[in-house]
Image (cartoon, rainbow, N blue to C red):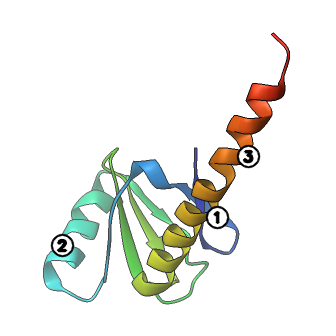
Amino acid sequence: MQLVNVGYGNMVAVNRLLAVVSPDSSPVRRLVQEVREQKKVIDVTMGRRTRSVLIMDSGHIVLSPLSSETLAARVEQQGKQEALQAPVLEEQAARMPE
């Protein structure tokens, strides 16, 4: 399971992430308000301005103080690190006695 830092040491599972959107549009604001009424909003901004909204596959929404571009870069970087580690892990598994 890959985790990505969404601000202030808070982590989100990348495989559960559906979208990272800007909070500035009216439809996104309405969505956040509707989900807030359902008690499914996770606010990790620590009082700072919300710069991105993460929509999860469970119906939860995470409010992050990081920009969408920053989060996208972190997710991409995590993917590259995992791709580099996969051959090493496979090699280690092959060396282990059964």
Mark 3 crowd level (few <14, some 14–19, many ≥20, 10 Å Cα): few
Q: Nearer the viewer, mark 2 or mark 1?
A: 1
- What amino acid type should be assigned to the residue bearing mark 1? Asn
- What amino acid type should be assigned to the residue bearing mark 3? Val
Q: Nearer the viewer, residue 76 or 64?
A: 76
Q: What residue is disc 1 on?
A: 10
Mark 1 crowd level (few <14, some 14–19, many ≥20, 10 Å Cα): few
Q: Is residue 74 visible?
A: yes
- Upstream in sequence: badge 2 or badge 1: 1
- Asked if residue 70 lies left or right of residue 61, the reply is right
Per the model, the C-alpha gap separating discs 2 and 1 is 24 Å
Cβ–Cβ under 8 Å for marks 2 and 3: no
Q: Nearer the viewer, residue 58 or 86?
A: 86
The label shown at residue 88 is: 3
Task: Find the residue positioned furthest to the left.
Answer: 27
Quadrant in which the N terminus appears = top right
Task: Find the residue positioned furthest to the top.
Answer: 98
- Asked if residue 35 lies left or right of residue 63, the reply is left
Q: Nearer the viewer, mark 2 or mark 3?
A: 3
Q: Nearer the viewer, mark 1 or mark 3?
A: 3
Q: Residue at x 55, y 78 (%)?
A: 45
Q: Secondary structure at mark 1?
A: strand
Q: Residue at x 56, y 65 (%)?
A: 80
* Residue 57 on image: x %, y %: 32, 47
Q: Secondary structure at mark 2?
A: helix
Q: Residue at x 66, y 46 (%)?
A: 87
